[in-house]
Image (cartoon, helix red, strand yellow):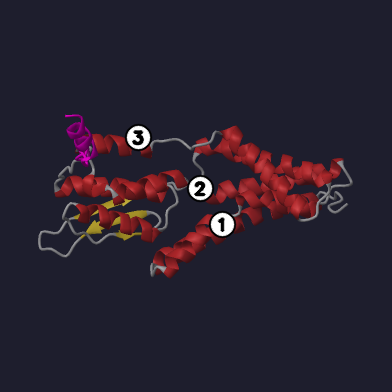
Amino acid sequence: MRLKRQWQRCLPRKRVNKMRKTDFTRDQTINIAVKMGKILLKSGAETYRVEDTISRCCLAHGYEVDPFVTPTVIILGNEDTDSFIRVSRIGYRSTNLSLISEMNRMSYNFSKWDMGYEETCSWLDKKWRQPAPYGKWAVCLASGIGSAAFSAMLGGNSHDFIAAFITGGMAMLVLKQIAGYHPSAFWENAIAGVVIGAVALMCCAISIQCTMEKIIVGALMPFVPGVPFCNGLRDYMAGNLMSGNSRIAEALLFASSIAIGIAFVLRVWFIWGWDLWR
């Protein structure tokens, strides 16, 4: 009897798969795919990643679509006689890698998704409204530390380190304060450039040991649009020429707006007759 029990314990147990496949209609599948695409675009994902995610989600339930995605719009359709067209626009974009990772994981597991349609839409709407993972003060502190570190890397002294910390933190704080008014990205970066130039000039006026170039360049680094530029290059390599052009042009426009803001402050300082370079 004891040997029988030990033999039964050695037998492999059947695993119970708790995941169940939920069947969605075509409209439900498309709605979910569009919501996922919007979250990806809003979070700063590449265009080819958004198209691949939408196609994978629809194919997981047997529906073939031809997505066309740009940095501001998602268009879905196919070549069937009873074809449909779904258009969705994206007005604001940021960078949130955690949301990109969640949507990517969901797309690969969508064939055995265990949530119903209403529950899935509610979950995606919650992710869409999810605030930034870090608060205003944490971002300002990180911006100041990054600015100070870059200033030190460029050979700045202790005065430059402190001045770059104040300049980068103040510029990010002003940017967060005016974000509630929803200005365009061009004016946001231009205002950040104005703040960087003004605070750097004040620091140099207070301490003669501060170096203008190292403070400004260090404070600029947190605002450099490196992610849009890299995404544009990746879209180019993936064959999405229109999206690549758009993202690279956007990155160059952001960089130009920051330079315009700094140049404006320096020009005003020079016209007023103050000593620009100490």
The structure residue drawn at horizontal position 23% and vertical position 34%, both measured from the top left corner, is: 6
| Residue 135 in picture, x, y percent from top left | 54, 33
The structure residue drawn at horizontal position 19% and vertical position 59%, both measured from the top left corner, is: 64
Residue 199 in view, yes or no: yes
Judged by depth in the image, the label closer to the viewer, 1 or 2, is: 1
SS for callout 2: loop
Query: Which amino acid lies under the numbered mark 3 shown in the image of this protein?
Result: Lys
Q: Is residue 19 above or below residue 156?
A: above
Answer with mark 3 or mark 2, whichever residue precedes in sequence.
3
Is the residue marked by circle 3 packed among few (<14), some (14-19), or many (20+) residues within 10 Å? few
**From the image, which quarter does the N terminus lie in?**
top left
Kindly identify which numbered label has been placed on residue 134: none
The image quarter in which residue 213 lies: bottom right
Judging depth in this view, the residue of 151 and 42 nearest the camera is 151
Q: Residue 16 in magenta?
A: yes
Q: Give the residues in magenta.
A: 1-19
| Residue 19 in picture, x, y percent from top left | 22, 40
Answer with mark 3 or mark 1, whichever residue precedes in sequence.
3
The residue carrying mark 2 is 184
The residue carrying mark 1 is 226
Judging depth in this view, the residue of 41 and 271 nearest the camera is 41
